[in-house]
Amino acid sequence: MANSRSTENSTIQAVDAPSCDESLVHLDNVRQVQPEVLSTEKAQRMAEFFSALSDPHRLKLLSALAQQELCVCDLAAAVKMGESAVSHQLRVLRSQRLVTYRRQGRNVYYGLADDHIMTLYREVAQHLDE
Amino acid sequence: MANSRSTENSTIQAVDAPSCDESLVHLDNVRQVQPEVLSTEKAQRMAEFFSALSDPHRLKLLSALAQQELCVCDLAAAVKMGESAVSHQLRVLRSQRLVTYRRQGRNVYYGLADDHIMTLYREVAQHLDE
DNA sequence: CAATCCTCTGAACAGATGTTCAGTGGTAAC
DNA sequence: GTTACCACTGAACATCTGTTCAGAGGATTG
């Protein structure tokens, strides 16, 4: 009964990290939540995905592609960026499978990869409108 | 800053000027798509939102909060970060209204702001599982 | 073949991001 | 009151991001 802190337990001892934390945390809560925390790998993958969407230029590119397939130079004109910059950004979008591409003659045509993205878009738009 | 290249001449750039010189880009496509491109402000806001989700530590924090309300020191223990770092990250999540918080005694309890986020989460998880 | 176009790539640089450290404010316990 | 704790903040620093520039790879045209 040393500490009068809490309903059922508590005490120190880091949950499984031997390092830093020796302060009094609510151990029961931490223990309950910790196994449900996203694994580092999944968190990483998901962060990279969101990262691909975290740039206004890339979002503009996607909104353009949501209309129709376009080649790089048209995309550049549509969003008013340099072609090299567009190419760099499309690389990012490709790496997360947000866009597809196919070569036709000298041009490479890009399009949206699937519909998850539009669903996502609407969900976020809704959140931002609140 | 400057409006991009102008090294050679002509080329891109005139998209919304009614010049009849369609030398290099597929003007019709560009004209068709351009008005549908996300505005800079909306793209910016949306990018900031996704940006808040683009860090593995913040995603871990959210996944912890998806389980239950937690105070900062518990969160820090659950995701194994320093409390200061957690505080900084929570600030980002707050700025995008991803979390709520309330003070109770010495602690500040954080929770998920709404259900859009879990919907988003599932949508992305699904996308990544393909 | 040479010339031209479209796209991609790597390097370099400016700006943004995330961590740690040190210090502050507010609340509860002594 | 003093002390201890929890959370927030600002500064400094290392790292990551995105742009531009210069040039290379592929494909078409004359």
Image (cartoon, coloured by chain):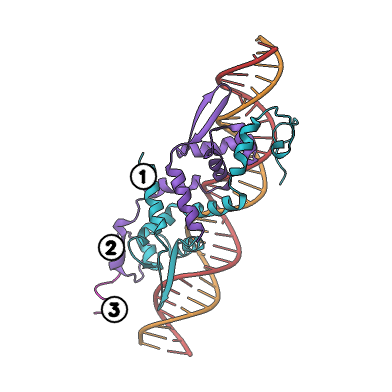
Chain colours: A purple, B cyan, C orange, D red
Local packing at callout 2 (Cα closer than 10 Å; few below 14, some 14-19, many 20+) is some
- The mark closer to the camera, 3 or 1, is 1
* Foreground residue among B27 and A17: B27
Image spot of residue B65 (x, y percent): 37, 62
Q: Which residue is mark 3?
A: A3
| Residue depicted at 28% across the width and 72% down the height | A10
Say what secondary structure mark 3 lies in: loop
Chain where mark 2 sits: A
* Residue extent of the magenta highlight: A1-15
Q: Are marks 3 and 2 on the same chain?
A: yes
* Foreground residue among D11 and A6: A6
User: What kind of residue is marked 3?
Assistant: Asn
Report the disc number at residue A32.
2
Q: Which residue is mark 1?
A: B126
| Residue depicted at 36% across the width and 38% down the height | B130
Distance of label 3 from label 2 (alpha carbons) = 21 Å
Q: Taking A126 as reference, is C26 above or below it?
A: below
User: What kind of residue is marked 2?
Assistant: Gln
Say what secondary structure mark 2 lies in: helix
